[in-house]
Image (cartoon, helix red, strand yellow):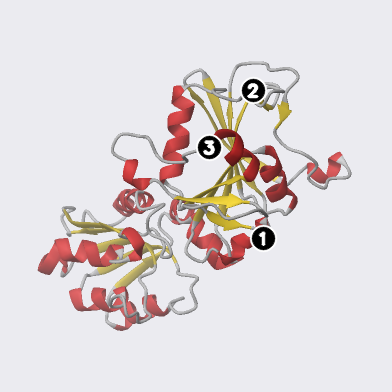
Amino acid sequence: MSAARGPHDRRFMAEAVRLGQGARGASAPNPNVGCLIVSGSGQVLGRGATARGGRPHAEAVALEQAGKRARGSTVYVTLEPCAHQSPRGPACADLLVEAKPERVVIALKDPDPRTHGEGIRRLRDAGVEVKLGVGRTAAADSLAGWLSRQKLGRPRITLKFALSIDGKIALPSGESKWITGEDARAHVHFERAQSDMILVGRGTFQADSPRLDVRLPGLEDWSPRRALLTRGEAVDGWEILRSPEDVYRLHDVNDLLVEGGSATATAFLSADLVDRILIYRAPIIVGEGKSSFGYVGLEAIADAHGRWAARDARPLGVDRLEVYERVRDA
């Protein structure tokens, strides 16, 4: 068995997933795919991730690095290579057929009907061995924003809050800087860098004049587009959503981060449009103050159970991050 088979498939696919994850927040409207090309002896010949704006695709980047050495190799890719023609570039399935690898290992079948299964068929018809499903869960997590657009017709929506132990987002005066410490705030900036767009409500905009940029060394250029939820006048430099349902027209956004405030969060939760909640909880008690959410339409406690699942919890300096995901039908 060569070094690129068996348990090594999982290791190399994990690296492809990491490459794709690094393109989150920049690849829209295309998926943030990762690709790794490995020789039979286990040497990495090419690495690629979807470029900014969606082109070139990960496979094209990796094949450019590998060149003629791709012949007889194993290609690891987090999403089925595209098979549809585009004025922006050739189909990746055709590029791979031309490169003549021995195997292509794919984490996920492409749900886009223009490719769905066709890329795999084209490779197999050319005599390329195809293995499907390696690293499926990790790849789906990495591609969650783009997959949400395919399944739900809208971006994956993450709601972020900084809270006290007793669930307050601010003092009665509205003062909220800073509830959490530097480590938690740095994590928020990393989440921003992996988002295509950040949204706040009009109240937060008027009270805080937020910059909503990324202020981590080396990631300043990854600041996402800014959006404002308002029924009022437009603001220069901000995209306007008149209601939470306007997310269905965001066809070039894979990941949307909603940063507040309470009225905006309540509106998105009431519309059942939140897929993920990030709570940065500080070890402080505020007492009387502003609550995180308002009325979200529940009439009984029983109706609240089973809707959210805890996915992660970890310390961030003196604070604690809690991650919850909406439980939806498959």
Which mark lies nearer to you, 2 or 3? 3
Q: Quadrant of the C terminus?
A: bottom right
Give the percent coordinates (x, y) of residue 220: 33, 41
How many residues crowd around disc 1 within 10 Å: few (fewer than 14), some, or many (20 or more)?
some
Q: Which residue is mark 3?
A: 209
Q: Which residue is mark 1?
A: 245
How many residues crowd around disc 3 within 10 Å: few (fewer than 14), some, or many (20 or more)?
few
Which quadrant would residue 163 be assigned to in this image? top right
Mark 2 residue type: Ser
Circle on res. 150: none
Residue at disc 2, secondary structure: loop
Give the percent coordinates (x, y) of residue 236: 49, 53
Instruction: Of the two numbered discs 1 and 2 on the same chain, state the one appearing first in sequence.
Output: 2
Which quadrant would residue 49 be assigned to in this image? bottom left
Instruction: Residue at 48% x, 73% y: name it.
Output: 112
In this view, the residue farthest toward the right is 299
Circle on res. 164: 2
Instruction: Residue at 42% x, 41% y: name it.
Output: 213
Q: CA distance from mark 3 to mark 1?
A: 24 Å
Instruction: Of the two numbered discs 3 and 1 on the same chain, state the one appearing first in sequence.
Output: 3
Q: Can you say whether 20 is above or below 188 in the image? A: below
